[in-house]
Amino acid sequence: MLSVRSLVRSAPRTARAFSNQTIRTSIKTPCGIPRQAATNPASWTRMQYTRGLAAFSTSVERAEPEGQVNAELAGKLAQELALEKEMRDPDTIPEHLKEFLDNTPFQLQDTPGSEEIVMTRAFGDEKIKVTFSVDDLNNVDEDPDQMQDHGMEDEFDDPSDLPTEAQANGGNTKASINQGRTAGGNFKVAPEDSIESSENVQNEEGIEHDNEPSFPAHLLVTVERANKGSLQIEAIAQDGLIVIDNIYFYKDASLADPKTAEQERTAARAYTGPPYGNLDEDLQILFENYLSERGINTTMALFVPEYIDYKEQREYTQWLSNVQNFVE
């Protein structure tokens, strides 16, 4: 009797335990996942990720056809390149530029693909570097007013149009070569130094130029002496003239061409000199003679704009060729 009651009372608990175990098993084991995968969460995650990829899989995309404009653009570039080469051979340096380079003490450093041109020389214990850029020619197209000379006389086409006072003080036309200044601040020109009014004029070094005003080419002249620092001069070369804009002195020569951020900050804080225009006129004349004595003179002032024009043409033709090869 007791055993029968015990069996009846235990029956619901056994059924309930069996039912709970069945429910827990059905929750833990998703439909379609093997039992061994259900006990390994890592494999379960990989299986879910794989199924997700399969659900979003797509067919392989076909490559886009070649651009329809490419051939037309490449053809136009080739046409432009042929036209430029027909006008001027970019691989042949003009004879008058070659003659200057053959006779100057400066060594030319012209890296293809770079906008900058550097000329260097030694003068006694000095290391001299003159830097100029193709950018000056490109900037002229954006600002035509830069074609005007820096002197007052450039505003007049005819010497007779100059004010009487300017003529009395020794003012000269832009067809004159700078040979120093008078007490009135104008350039002195000896009769034998005047430039003839012909279509093309050739100076003693063989540099030819016409009467049309050239564009202003910016020069950065750096003169360095061991253990004495560096003198840096900003100047303009135009129409056979070297016009000084600013002069800076650095006790530490490395500050003239800073390589690090710290050097740039130090150079920016340094006192490098007064505005050039505030200097005594006699002092300005001596600085001009200082440059001329080192070969930064009329001949170089004629050479620099001509060489910039030559280099820009050469870089342009190379650019056309590079872009053509790219789009073909």
Image (cartoon, rainbow, N blue to C red):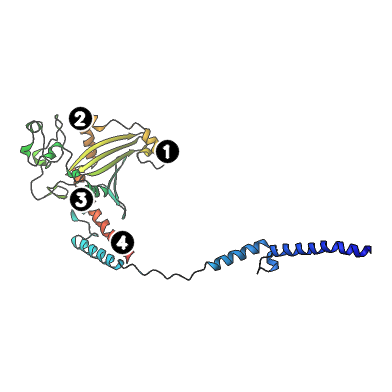
Q: Position of residue 25 (x, y in %)?
A: 72, 64
What type is the residue that disc 3 sits on? Glu
State the SS at label 1. Answer: helix
- Give the residue drawn at x 49%, y 69%: 58
Residue picked out by circle 2: 282
| Left or right: 53 as drawn, with respect to 91 | right
Of label 1 and label 4, which has the lower sequence position? 1
Q: For mark 1, does the 10 Å Cα neighbourhood hold few (<14), some (14 to 19), or many (20 or more) residues?
A: few
Q: Position of residue 35 (x, y in %)?
A: 70, 67
Residue picked out by circle 1: 262
Q: Position of residue 154 (x, y in %)?
A: 13, 40
- Give the residue drawn at x 32%, y 64%: 327
Of label 1 and label 3, which has the lower sequence position? 1
What type is the residue that disc 4 sits on? Val
- Give the residue drawn at x 54%, y 67%: 55
Between 59 and 219, which is closer to the camera in this rendering?
59
Between 140 and 113, which is closer to the camera in this rendering?
140
Q: CA distance from mark 3 to mark 2?
A: 31 Å
State the SS at label 2. Answer: helix
Q: CA distance from mark 2 to mark 1?
A: 37 Å
Q: Quadrant of the C terminus?
A: bottom left
Quadrant in the rendering for residue 62: bottom left
Residue picked out by circle 3: 306
Of label 2 and label 1, which has the lower sequence position? 1
